[in-house]
Each structure stands twice: as structure tokens, then as C-alpha cells.
């Protein structure tokens, strides 16, 4: 059972592959992503509001894919504007993230090397995420070793 912070409330989820709500954590988003580098891939999902339909839809469809997330060493971090500290907001407006004030929903697939591999502006199907990951050279090497 994975324990996850969601909008400041402690919830239990059966989703491994770590679905996290980042807004209530103490470390910065950059520090969180740096910790995962070389070990985990990250699907970072941003929404302006936790009740936003696209945000809820993305969360719901990912919850059904525990095995696929686990198999690909993929963590999901869900962010909302209200819970996002200013330093994290600034981090997302720079570099490869390019979050803008007009973005109401946006997501990024981040590889184990820390680089943004794919950006999306509407909910993405797990199968599409898995195809992108499975085409990566690092993932192909992992599959050969298994």
C-alpha cells in the first residue's frame, strides 16, 4: 500500500509506482526530481485546480495501470497551482518545462537522466506513455537485462 499526500490530507492508495501530490511536501520539486534521477522516471502532471476535469481524468486513468508504472520504474507526481510553492512555480516556467500562465493542464514525462522526454497538454493514455518509454534506449537495455 502506497501512502500519498493529497491536498494536505493523508490518503492510502493501492497505486505503487508512487503517485504523489507534491504540493504539501517540504522539499522543492527540483530536489524531488534530482533524488529520482538515475533511478526512477517521472510523469509530472500539473493542473490549475484539483477538481479540474482533465486533472481528475489523468489521475483516474493512471490509477488503473499499477503494473505498467511499476514495470517501467515510473513515479507520478500530481501538482496543482494552489498547492505549488512559488519556487516550484518558477522552476516549472524555466528550462524544458516551459509552464505558462495560460496552461491549465500540462504534463511532462521525465527520463531517468532527468531530461524531459515528452510534453502533453491534455490527459495522456498510459499506453501512449508506455510506448514512449519503451522506445527509449535505456528502457530497451533494461528489458534486455531482465
Image: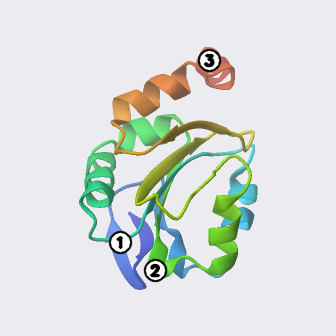
Residue at position x 29%, y 54% in the image: 54
Disc on the earlier residue, 1 or 3? 1
User: Label 2 neighbourhood size at 10 Å, few (<14), some (14-19), many (20+)?
Assistant: few
Q: Is 122 left or right of 69, judged from the image as shown?
A: left
The kind of secondary structure element at disc 3 is: helix
Establish if 42 lies above or below 144: below
Q: Is 144 left or right of 50, judged from the image as shown?
A: right
* Residue at numbered disc 1: 49
Give the farthest residue toward the bottom.
8
Scheme of colours in the image: rainbow
Residue at position x 33%, y 59% in the image: 55
Establish if 83 lies above or below 50: below
Which disc number belongs to residue 82?
2
Q: Is 52 left or right of 137, judged from the image as shown?
A: left
The x and y percentages for residue 23 are 52, 76
Determine whether label 2 and label 1 are within 8 Å by CB: yes
Q: CA distance from mark 2 to mark 1?
A: 7 Å
Quadrant assignment for the C terminus: top right
Amino acid at each position: 500500500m502506497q501512502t500519498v499526500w493529497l491536498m494536505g490530507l493523508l490518503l492510502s492508495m493501492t497505486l505503487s509506482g508512487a503517485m504523489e501530490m507534491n504540493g504539501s511536501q517540504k522539499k522543492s520539486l527540483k530536489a524531488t526530481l534530482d533524488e529520482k534521477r538515475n533511478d526512477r522516471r517521472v510523469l509530472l502532471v500539473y493542473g490549475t485546480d484539483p477538481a479540474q476535469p482533465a486533472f481528475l481524468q489523468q489521475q483516474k486513468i493512471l490509477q488503473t495501470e499499477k503494473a505498467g508504472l511499476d514495470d517501467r520504474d515510473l513515479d507520478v507526481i500530481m501538482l496543482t497551482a494552489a498547492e505549488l510553492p512559488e519556487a516550484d512555480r518558477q522552476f516549472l516556467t524555466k528550462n524544458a518545462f516551459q509552464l505558462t500562465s495560460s496552461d491549465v493542464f500540462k504534463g511532462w514525462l521525465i527520463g531517468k537522466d532527468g531530461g524531459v522526454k515528452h510534453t502533453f497538454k491534455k490527459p495522456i493514455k498510459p499506453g501512449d506513455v508506455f510506448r514512449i518509454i519503451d522506445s527509449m534506449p535505456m528502457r530497451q537495455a533494461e528489458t534486455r537485462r531482465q
